Image: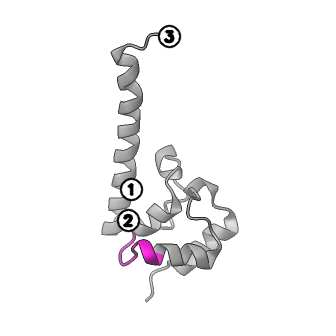
Amino acid sequence: MPVIGPDDRRAPLARAAAVRKERAEAREALKRGRTSLREVPDTDTPAVRSMPVRALLESLPDIGKVRADRLLAELGTSASRRVRGLGARQRDRLLERCAPQQ
């Protein structure tokens, strides 16, 4: 077995922390209304594109775990689906269903 030094252990942990921070910032922006749901699937940020759709829905105002699960079931989307894994139809139905009511 190769010997792993302290720097080799810290690098993956630092990358993971940066991804978690970036996802948290994206969820917070959605929650506060600084970003719309329509902008998220088109982002080129790998950390956001690899976020589960369920976590994305839960970060929207007035949507919790139960409502997010119901939405995913209505749309026929798996709870483990990632943002980058949404097809064009799934994305369109999700955006249509979660569009703000005026």
Give the extent of the magenta segment.
60-67
35 or 53: which is nearer to us? 53
Q: Which residue is mark 1?
A: 26
Q: Name the mark nearer the viewer: 3 or 1.
A: 3
Q: Residues within 10 Å of mark 3 (few under 14, many from 20)?
A: few
**Which image quadrant for residue 19?**
top left
Q: Residues within 10 Å of mark 2 (few under 14, many from 20)?
A: many
Considering only order in the chain, which callout, 1 or 3, is on the residue closer to the N terminus? 3
84 or 16: which is nearer to us? 16
Residue 65 at x, y percent in the picture: 42, 71
Kind of residue indicated by mark 2: Leu
Kind of residue indicated by mark 3: Pro
Q: Which residue is mark 3?
A: 2
**Which image quadrant for residue 3?**
top left
User: What is the spatial separation of the Cα atoms under label 2 and label 3, in whole angstroms?
Assistant: 43 Å
Residue 49 at x, y percent in the picture: 53, 51
User: Marks 1 and 2: CB-CB under 8 Å?
Assistant: yes
Q: Which residue is mark 2?
A: 30
52 or 31: which is nearer to us? 52
Kind of residue indicated by mark 1: Ala
